[in-house]
Image (cartoon, rainbow, N blue to C red):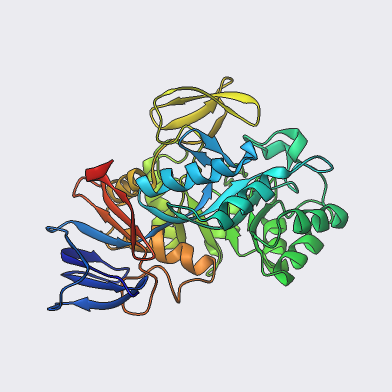
Amino acid sequence: MCMSLIIRNAVICNPNRQFKGDILIEDGDITKVGCIDENGDITLDASGRLVFPGFIDLHIQGAGGADVLDAKPEALHIISKTCAKFGVTSFLATTVYRPRKSNKHFSSAVKAHKQGLKGARFLGFHLEGPFISPKKKGMIRFTSICKPSLDIFENIIEDTHGFLRMMTIAPELEGSTEIIERLVKHSIIPSFGHSSASYEETLRGFEAGISHVTHLFNAMNPIHHRSPGPLLAIFESGNITAQIISDGVHIVPPMIKFAVSVMGINRLVLITDGMRALGLPEGKYLYDGQEFISYKGTARYLDGTLIGTTLGINNLAERFLKFTGVFLCSISRVASLNPAKVLGLSDKKGRIEPGVDADITILNRDFTVWKTIVEGRIVFDSQNF
């Protein structure tokens, strides 16, 4: 039976403009936007709240006390539900690969996906490594790093069961070019990151097929006037997209604003880089067997190494708006449309218009989440939480 849902009195924040109107959803798709006279099976009065295309997080390790590395189906269920609580409607489960060791966390996540998630949708895996620079490893353990190897690459393809969507790779490593080319051949996004690459090595990576950047500024060389490094190559490129963590800690506010001015709003993708402590009280937690502290939305190992955030993407969207001064509808680009484009899904996600998936995030004016809708179904309701 075709179920219908109507959202009335919404401030609709599309990537290009915002306007007041209603939204009709039927059988999981948006079918009409504007002034809607008919009634639905369910009616929501948004009462002037902000209605965005569902947020898509391309980089999240864990949330709600769970991590992809837990290697249990229930971990992905918890992450899915917690993501929805913060306005995320779909995500890439971000994790690492342990060469020549057990990697059961992939099959566990796929099992949970096939069971049916009750929150945000699983779109596949984002692997950070294993072909990255040990000098720029950040949070990643040495056991999840190795030299580029076609044999290991083929093992990764097999172990991820057809769900690998993105791999972070360091292009300066010997043998990385062939891996990048294989990724492109498999329709997997090669992403620059955790790299010690020079300006020239970064450009060669782009030529080989790298089209995206993992957490801009972090785990890469800075700009220097005699050694420009990867950042200048990234900024100069007209088509390379980049993830950005707008917490004000991973990147200080003036640099976030600078990134927008240099790259433009169409090339940036808002991510959480979320850890298992996301959505939980401050305190000590574990990532891959190593203790970290969650404090004021930031996750750090005990030695001070910055490893991620514990903030919801709605919180990061609010900070992005504050730090950059962009228009409100720009949030729909950096958190919805741009990640959808990166994944090749912009024909069905990233906009509020007829014919696209009914993935919708409704925020209060203070950017807290009122409701999250996935494929026409309310998966988070703050009034019943």
Q: Which of 359 and 182 is in front in this view?
A: 359
Coordinates of residue 48 in the picture (x, y in percent): 13, 59
Total labels drawn: 0
- Looking at the image, residue 193 sits to the left or right of residue 342; the answer is right
Please, is residue 29 above or below residue 253 in the view?
Answer: below
Q: Which residue is drawn at 81% across and 43% down?
A: 99
Q: Which of 22 and 316 is in front in this view?
A: 22
Kindly tell me whether residue 129 is visible in this rendering: yes
Coordinates of residue 317 in the picture (x, y in percent): 34, 49
- Looking at the image, residue 300 sits to the left or right of residue 324; the answer is right
Q: Quadrant of the N terminus?
A: bottom left
Q: Quadrant of residue 113?
A: bottom right
- Looking at the image, residue 138 sits to the left or right of residue 380; the answer is right
Instruction: Give the residue at the far front of this rendering.
Output: 1
Q: Which of 219 and 318 is in front in this view?
A: 318
Q: Residue at x 77, y 66 (%)?
A: 182
Q: Quadrant of the C terminus?
A: top left
Coordinates of residue 157 in the picture (x, y in percent): 76, 59
Instruction: Give the residue at the far right of this rendering.
Output: 151
Please, is residue 219 above or below residue 165 in the view?
Answer: above
Q: Quadrant of residue 248?
A: top left
Please, is residue 278 above or below residue 321 in the view?
Answer: above
Kindly tell me whether residue 228 is visible in this rendering: no
Q: Quadrant of residue 354?
A: bottom left
Q: Residue at x 74, y 71 (%)?
A: 185
Q: Residue at x 63, y 25 (%)?
A: 290
Q: Nearer the viewer, residue 246 or 113?
A: 113
Coordinates of residue 335 in the picture (x, y in percent): 40, 57
